[in-house]
C-alpha cells in the first residue's frame, strides 16, 4: 500500500467525538433517499478517480474523486452482512490479484472502509498498469467481490474551488451526522481545505469550502498548505468541529459553526504525537466508559529512530485532550521527544499489538479490521481487539 511519505509541511491530527458526533462506524441512522441523500439518479457515475471512501447511514458509500472535483454517494443496499468468523486473509494483494486476473505487483490498495451497517470491508483499489480505479468488497467469510459502479443509485456533489486553483486531491471523507466532511487540497497559499456538504446530500449540489490554518507544533509556526490526511467529526457543548491529521502529528480541532463560505478557520493544536510521521487512518471508540482515538501512522525515520519493529505504528489517544484550552498551540503537550518509542504522557500511548498496521477501520464495538504488513511486504487482513 503506498501513501505519501513526504516530510512534514503542516500537521494536525485526529479526532473523536466526546459529544459524540457520528464517526465512520457510528453512521447507522437514516436511510438513503430519506435524511441521507435526496434526488438519486440511476446509472454509472462519471468518476475520474477514487481517492477516498467512507460510509454514511444504511450502507451509503461515499467516494471522494479529487480529479473530478466531486463526491459521489451511492446507496449500496448493503445492510445485512456476515460477522468476521474467519478472522482475516493471509495474502490480501495475492487474492485480489487472482480475483481480478492480474498480478499482485499490479495492485495498489488505496483505502479501506468498513460499512458499519453490514461489517463488510470496502477497498479502493488501483490497477497500476491500466491506471484504473475500482472498489472491491470483502465479507466476513473472506470472500472478495467487485462492487460494480455500472448501474447504481447515486447523487453527485461538486466540490467548490479554491481562490486561485481547483481542488485537486481528496485525502479523506467522513459522515458527520448532519453533513459530509471532506479533506482536500488546492495548489495555493491556503491549500489545505475542509469541505462541508449538508445532509441530505442532493444531486448536482455543491459543498461549502473552508481553508485551514494550523499551528505545526514540531515546526513552531502556523502553516496553511499541506493537506489533512485523515478527518473525523467532533462535537463539544453543542458546537461542531472537524479534527484532522496532517503529515506530522499534532492533534488539531477546527470550529465549523458560523463559518461563511470561503472562510479561513484556525485550528487549535492540543497535543503533538511526534515529527517524522504520516497519519494513515483514524477512528474513535469507547472502552470502560472512556473515549479514545486510534490512529495508525507511517514512520519516515524508522531506521534512525524507530517506534517499533515496523515503520507502521499505532497510537491510542485519550479523547479528553480535545477539551484542552490552556496547553494548546505553542504550549501543546508532546507525546515524545528523543526516542520515538517512549511516550512522555499518558494522553497518547503506542499500541504494540497494532505494529505493522497500514490501514484500519472500526469493525464493531470490540474490534478493528486492519490491513497489516510483514517484514516481506505481504499484506494480510486481520481482526484485532480494540486496545
Image (cartoon, rainbow, N blue to C red):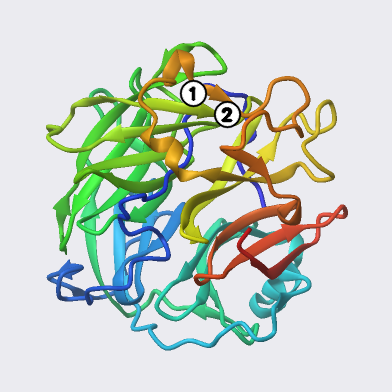
Q: Nearer the viewer, residue 97 or 195?
A: 195
Q: Is any part of residue 107 visible from this angle? A: yes
- Which quarter of the image is occupied by the C terminus? bottom right
Please give the residue where the numbered disc 2 appears in the rendered image: 248
Whole-angstrom CA distance, mark 1 to mark 2, is 7 Å
Q: Residue at x 69, y 70 (%)?
A: 382
Q: Residue at x 37, y 35 (%)?
A: 323
Residue 256 as seen in the image, left or right of residue 188: left
x and y, in percent, of residue 104 in the image? 75, 65
Residue 120: numbered disc: none
Q: Is label 2 in a helix, a strand or a loop?
A: loop
Q: In which quarter of the image is residue 299?
A: top right
Q: Residue at x 49, y 40 (%)?
A: 229
x and y, in percent, of residue 111 in the image? 54, 57
- Where is 183 relative to 104, above or below? above
Q: Residue farthest to the front? A: 288
- Where is 209 relative to 41, above or below? above
x and y, in percent, of residue 349 in the image? 65, 41
Q: Is label 1 in a helix, a strand or a loop?
A: loop
Please give the residue where the numbered disc 1 appears in the rendered image: 10
Q: In which quarter of the image is residue 77?
A: bottom left
Q: Nearer the viewer, residue 341 or 42?
A: 341
Q: Residue at x 35, y 17 (%)?
A: 189
Upstream in sequence: badge 1 or badge 2: 1
x and y, in percent, of residue 30 in the image? 22, 74
Q: Which of 218 and 44 is in front in this view?
A: 218
Marks 1,2: beta carbons within 8 A: yes
Q: Nearer the viewer, residue 198 or 65?
A: 198
Q: Is any part of residue 102 visible from this angle? A: no
Amino acid at each position: 500500500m503506498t501513501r505519501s511519505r513526504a516530510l512534514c509541511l503542516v500537521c494536525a491530527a485526529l479526532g473523536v467525538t466526546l459529544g459524540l458526533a457520528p464517526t465512520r462506524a457510528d453512521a447507522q441512522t437514516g436511510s438513503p433517499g430519506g435524511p441521507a441523500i435526496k434526488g438519486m439518479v440511476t446509472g454509472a457515475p462519471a468518476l475520474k478517480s477514487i481517492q477516498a471512501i467512507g460510509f454514511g447511514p444504511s450502507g451509503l458509500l461515499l467516494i471522494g474523486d479529487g480529479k473530478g472535483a466531486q463526491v459521489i454517494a451511492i446507496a449500496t443496499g448493503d445492510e445485512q452482512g456476515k460477522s468476521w468468523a474467519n478472522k482475516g486473509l493471509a495474502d490480501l494483494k495475492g487474492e485480489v490479484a487472482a480475483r481480478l486476473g492480474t498480478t499482485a505487483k499490479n495492485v495498489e490498495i488505496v483505502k479501506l472502509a468498513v460499512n458499519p451497517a453490514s461489517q463488510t470491508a470496502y477497498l479502493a483499489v488501483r490497477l497500476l498498469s491500466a491506471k484504473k480505479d475500482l472498489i472491491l468488497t470483502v465479507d466476513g467469510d473472506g470472500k472478495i467481490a467487485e462492487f460494480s459502479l455500472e448501474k447504481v443509485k447515486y447523487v453527485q456533489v461538486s466540490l467548490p474551488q479554491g481562490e486561485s486553483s481547483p481542488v485537486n486531491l481528496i485525502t479523506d471523507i467522513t459522515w458527520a451526522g448532519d453533513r459530509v466532511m471532506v479533506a482536500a487540497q488546492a495548489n495555493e497559499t491556503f491549500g489545505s481545505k475542509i469541505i462541508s456538504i449538508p445532509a441530505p446530500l442532493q444531486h448536482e449540489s455543491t459543498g461549502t469550502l473552508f481553508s485551514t490554518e494550523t499551528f505545526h507544533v514540531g515546526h513552531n509556526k502556523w502553516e496553511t498548505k499541506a493537506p489533512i490526511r485523515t478527518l473525523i467529526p467532533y462535537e463539544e457543548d453543542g458546537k461542531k468541529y472537524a479534527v484532522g491529521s496532517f503529515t506530522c502529528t499534532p492533534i488539531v480541532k477546527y470550529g465549523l459553526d458560523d463559518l461563511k463560505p470561503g472562510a479561513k478557520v484556525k485550528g487549535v493544536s492540543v497535543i503533538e504525537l511526534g515529527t517524522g510521521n504520516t497519519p494513515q487512518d483514524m477512528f474513535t471508540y469507547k472502552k470502560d466508559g472512556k473515549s479514545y482515538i486510534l490512529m495508525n501512522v507511517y514512520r519516515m525515520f524508522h531506521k534512525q529512530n524507530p517506534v517499533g519493529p515496523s515503520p507502521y505504528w499505532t497510537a491510542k489517544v485519550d479523547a479528553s485532550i480535545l477539551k484542552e484550552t490552556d496547553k494548546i498551540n505553542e504550549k501543546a503537550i508532546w507525546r515524545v521527544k528523543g526516542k520515538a518509542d517512549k511516550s512522555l504522557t499518558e494522553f497518547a500511548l503506542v499500541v504494540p499489538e497494532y505494529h505493522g498496521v497500514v490501514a484500519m477501520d472500526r469493525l464493531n464495538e470490540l474490534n478493528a479490521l486492519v490491513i497489516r504488513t510483514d517484514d516481506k511486504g505481504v499484506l494480510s487482513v486481520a481482526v484485532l481487539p480494540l486496545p
